[in-house]
């Protein structure tokens, strides 16, 4: 699992400590953590992988399973990441420390119903492990809508496997997504008619 | 946000197709559809205060030079009261519009960001949208809009195209012919920024400025074009001259620009005061250039054609036309070839 963590540059030592704790807790949970600070985490994504995605016009953020925004100090990227993640239906954990004085930017969201993929959380330091663990659990179990949650085992022949591999490459997707989106859903739509 | 919220004008000029929650394709083709369209994208309000404005709702194939002038004038009206401008535009002619805007908007000190969607209202059957809508999740149509709005709040003072993971100088961009989600390619210094874990602009962008915008929207679209290829007939030049052509633009070969049979007709054009422009990015300057034709080998074709129209709106005198065409107006000239 890949999680992108955005924190804002600032001079408050206690916030820097909290940022480090967020990263440590996530790493201890076994996830790959990438942050917006160049010297941390990006070595887990190979340079050639990033270049391949870039050349294909893909956004590296789309490859993340979830996004955590620590917004105790807000910068111009906070709103952008939140809006982007909502548009792409990416699970987001939006955090701000209780005594930081920050407020959520979700007040500018022009729909009264906040998407299920967004979790807004005011926190204090002792709460962090539980909050982060809960977020990871939500991603794994697909509690956000639109995520497939039921595991289904299907035995296939080598010929079918080769076909699926070819199609996945053609449509730049996974074999499972190809089956779900291109084959099964289409069949269901046709059947409804 | 750390700074006060930006106010961004969102101009609808086609190319606004999005997929709704119930699978429809929805694009703004008239002013009355804007409110419903914005309701489909509540996340846009997180980025900035948006002022939506309808300019044109047809397909990219219906974009005309008159519409370019109207768009430039509308941007000029809104400019003093906004921090940036986003323009939605159909794919097929977005590069032309972007290049023309770069010539029409002088002393530009705020971002004008064009973006696009390949989803069109006509694609309502699964067969029409196969391979496009079914790849919607990876196509990033909504992502383009989010990225364009974000770029419109950044420290940038030029006309750009935002698509896929690239921010590109509009007059140094061409349509891509390769596979992948990058529908456009920058050339020269045209790559101004990239999207990875955020949007990063490179050091050579033109930054915001405080000066007053001057809109120079006059143009003359009596430019006849012809692609030189083995099946080309030189007599076509005569027909173009007879039709009222005021400038001639040839997509020429790179070594010798055209066959010998063309020379008498091009001399006829010159005698009638019609400037002849030869465009080829790989052509080398020669002594024949300046005598027989004006060679453009340091701009994209789209930038060269729109600049021809823009310059023709100022002068028809050949030498003055040549000087204005060669003068760098908005970073359109590719330095390596200059």
Image (cartoon, coloured by chain):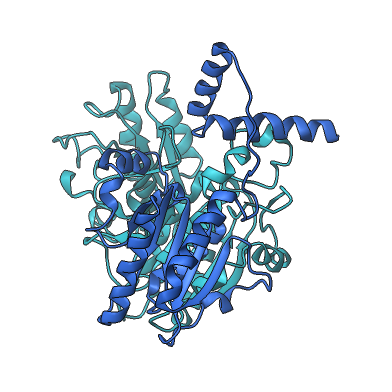
Name the residue at 41% across, 43% down.
Answer: A57
Location of residue B28 in the rendering, given as x and y in whole percent from the top left corner: 67, 58
Name the residue at 35% across, 40% down.
Answer: A55
Question: Quadrant location of the C terminus of chain A?
Answer: top right
A158 w.r.t. B273: above or below = above
Residue sitting nearer the eye, B284 or A79 = A79
Name the residue at 42% across, 75% down.
Answer: A126
B67 w.r.t. B272: above or below = below
Chain B shade in the render: cyan
Location of residue B336 in the rendering, given as x and y in whole percent from the top left corner: 16, 45
Residue sitting nearer the eye, B137 or B304 = B137
B42 w.r.t. B173: above or below = below
- The chain assigned the colour blue in the figure is A
- Report the label total: 0
Q: Is residue B130 left or right of residue A102?
A: right
Q: Do we see residue B157 in this rendering?
A: no
Q: Do we see residue B50 in this rendering?
A: yes
Name the residue at 34% across, 38% down.
Answer: A52
Location of residue B99 in the rendering, given as x and y in whole percent from the top left corner: 39, 54
Location of residue B77 in the rendering, given as x and y in whole percent from the top left corner: 50, 77
A8 w.r.t. B230: above or below = below
Residue sitting nearer the eye, B68 or B37 = B37
Residue sitting nearer the eye, B250 or B298 = B298
Quadrant location of residue B214?
Answer: bottom left
């Amino acid at each position: 699992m890949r999680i992108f963590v955005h924190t804002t540059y600032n001079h408050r030592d206690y916030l820097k400590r909290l940022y480090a704790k967020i990263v440590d807790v996530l790493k201890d949970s076994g996830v790959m953590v990438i942050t917006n600070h160049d010297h941390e985490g990006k070595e887990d994504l190979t340079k050639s992988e990033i270049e391949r995605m870039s050349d294909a016009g893909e956004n590296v953020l789309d490859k993340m399973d979830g996004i955590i925004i620590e917004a105790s100090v807000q910068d111009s990227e906070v709103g952008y990441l939140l809006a982007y993640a909502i548009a792409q239906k990416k699970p987001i954990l939006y955090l701000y420390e209780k005594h930081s004085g920050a407020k959520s930017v979700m007040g500018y969201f022009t729909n009264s119903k906040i998407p299920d993929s967004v979790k807004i959380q005011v926190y204090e330091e002792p709460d962090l492990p539980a909050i982060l663990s809960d977020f990871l659990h939500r991603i794994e179990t697909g509690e956000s809508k639109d995520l497939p949650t039921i595991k289904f085992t299907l035995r296939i022949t080598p010929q079918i496997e080769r076909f699926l591999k070819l199609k996945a490459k053609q449509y730049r997707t996974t074999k499972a997504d190809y089956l779900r989106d291109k084959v099964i859903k289409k069949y269901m739509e046709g059947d409804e008619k | 946000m750390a700074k006060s919220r930006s106010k961004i004008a969102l101009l609808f000029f086609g190319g606004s197709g999005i997929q709704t929650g119930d699978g429809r394709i929805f694009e703004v083709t008239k002013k009355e559809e804007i409110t419903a369209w914005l309701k489909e994208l509540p996340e846009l309000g997180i980025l900035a205060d948006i002022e939506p404005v309808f300019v044109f709702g047809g397909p990219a194939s219906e974009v005309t030079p008159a519409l370019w002038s109207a768009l430039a004038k509308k941007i000029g009206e809104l400019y003093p009261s906004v921090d940036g401008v986003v323009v939605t535009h159909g794919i097929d002619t977005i590069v032309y519009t972007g290049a023309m805007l770069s010539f029409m908007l002088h002393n530009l000190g705020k971002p004008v960001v064009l973006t696009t969607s390949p989803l069109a209202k006509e694609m309502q059957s699964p067969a029409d949208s196969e391979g496009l809508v079914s790849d919607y999740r990876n196509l990033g149509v909504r992502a383009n809009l989010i990225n364009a709005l974000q770029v419109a709040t950044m420290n940038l003072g030029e006309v750009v195209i935002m698509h896929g993971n690239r921010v590109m100088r509009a007059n140094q961009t061409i349509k891509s012919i390769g596979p992948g989600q990058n529908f456009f390619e920058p050339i020269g210094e045209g790559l101004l920024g990239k999207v990875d874990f955020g949007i990063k602009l490179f050091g050579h962008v033109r930054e915001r400025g405080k000066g007053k915008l001057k809109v120079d929207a006059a143009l003359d679209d009596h430019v006849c074009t012809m692609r030189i290829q083995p099946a080309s007939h030189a007599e076509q030049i005569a027909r173009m001259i007879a039709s009222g052509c005021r400038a001639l633009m040839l997509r020429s070969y790179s070594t010798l620009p055209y066959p010998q049979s063309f020379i008498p007709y091009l001399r006829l054009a010159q005698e009638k005061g019609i400037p002849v422009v030869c465009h080829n990015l790989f052509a080398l300057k020669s002594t024949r250039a300046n005598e027989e034709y004006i060679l453009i080998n340091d701009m994209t074709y789209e930038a060269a054609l729109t600049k021809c129209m823009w310059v023709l709106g100022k002068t028809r005198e050949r030498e003055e036309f040549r000087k204005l065409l060669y003068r760098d107006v908005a970073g359109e000239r590719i330095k390596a070839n200059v």
